[in-house]
Amino acid sequence: MSPFSFIKRPIQWLKNITKYKVTHSQAPNFAYDLCLRRLKSKDVGQLDLSSWEGAGNAAEPINPKVMMNFVETFSPCGFRWETFAPAYGLAEYTLLVSSKPKGTHPVFTCVDASAMEQDKVVEADPQQEKGTRVMASCRRLVCETNLAIVNPDTLTRCAEDEVGEIWVSDPSMAQGYWQREDATKETFQAYIKDTQEGPFLRTGDLGFFKDGELYITGRMKDLIIIRGTNHYPQDLEWTVQHLNPVFRSDYGAAFSVEVDGEEQLVVVQELERRSGELDFEQLLGDIRQEIAEEHEIQTYAIVLAKSGTVLKTASGKIQRRACRQNFLNGSINIAAVWSDNAEVMDKFAAG
């Protein structure tokens, strides 16, 4: 099933699993969420997911709420908790770094959100929703994987209660990038500064390792740092996209821009194609309020974009850098925009 066909008819994926008694099929987090959004009551009775043994979940940040909702919704169809298989990997490593052992259940941990913003891992009460963050483990390291969580600034190992860059090594690691000597040295030949352990592959991903479980917090290059506090774009995007069904799922981007020497938050969110008449002032106000309440951060600008605006990679990942550049250029196909900065409003009004 092609990605394009899936986007058009996500429930057909589940119908194919039913028809062909599929045992293993995997997809990114957004695919499971899209199935939940597009599901109709008549579809449930047509599905039998009991043959499904491994529902791989990787390639982008895993949202525990999506997993929980998926299990709750499709358990009447035979889908089981142990079917979910969160994993982590990358092409430079010949794919798999960690995965869930067959027959085991997914593992979650609840951490203090404020501490996480300072790269600290502090356990929190899972019953307390405000100020906490539930994270899904990408489970156990596979084969001969050697893992190090490293401070990307000092290039030394992080403490067990710290978030750092994920470095990995084992015989499956690629030798480097074709005819790119500098990039190969930087990425594939990393050594821990004080111990000279290595060489490691620098993944560019942030995470922590707790009780033998690997947790991914986000991409280094996408991290939003405002007034010394870390904000993960996928968390901000999730908050926006679940405010209202007119916001297109997995077609939004949160990033920062520099304004008068300080980083400021910008959110670009696509609207569904058939949204009808909308109260843009209300939608923009809801986004500002929800981000302020959930993430304790003020928004500098919000752009509601027409469908087809937010760019993705061939593998379906949001191109936040491209979206940021389009914002700076004023080249986004907008439906509505808000900002306290008159220059931003004028730029898009002129476009």
Image: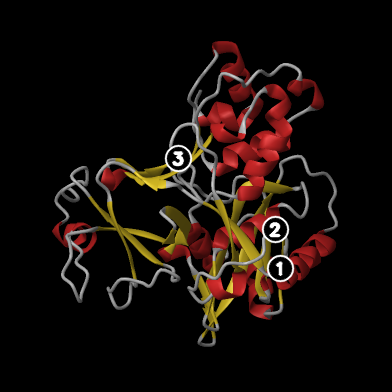
Q: Dot 1: what SS?
A: helix
Q: Is residue 242 visible?
A: yes
Whether 75 is drawn above or below 131: the answer is above
Disc 2 versus disc 1: nearer the observer:
1
Q: Which residue is mark 3?
A: 100
The first of marks 2 and 1 along the sequence is: 2
Q: Dot 2: what SS?
A: helix
- Could you say which is closer to the camera, residue 193 or residue 91? 193
Left or right: 24, with 327 as reference point: left
Q: Which residue is mark 1?
A: 294
- Could you say which is closer to the camera, residue 111 or residue 57? 111
- Could you say which is closer to the camera, residue 204 or residue 154? 154
3D distance between C-alphas at marks 3 and 1: 31 Å
The first of marks 3 and 1 along the sequence is: 3
Q: Amino acid at mark 3?
A: Lys
Q: Image point 61% across, 20% down: which residue?
A: 50
Disc 2 versus disc 3: nearer the observer:
3
**How has the structure been colored for display?**
secondary structure
Q: Quadrant of residue 73?
A: top right
The first of marks 2 and 3 along the sequence is: 3
Q: Which residue is mark 2?
A: 240
Q: Residues within 10 Å of mark 1 (few under 14, many from 20)?
A: few
Q: Is residue 334 visible?
A: no
Q: Image point 60% across, 45% down: which residue?
A: 308
Q: Quadrant of residue 221?
A: bottom left
Left or right: 176, with 65 as reference point: left
- Which x, y percent locates residue 96? 34, 41
Left or right: 276, with 31 as reference point: right
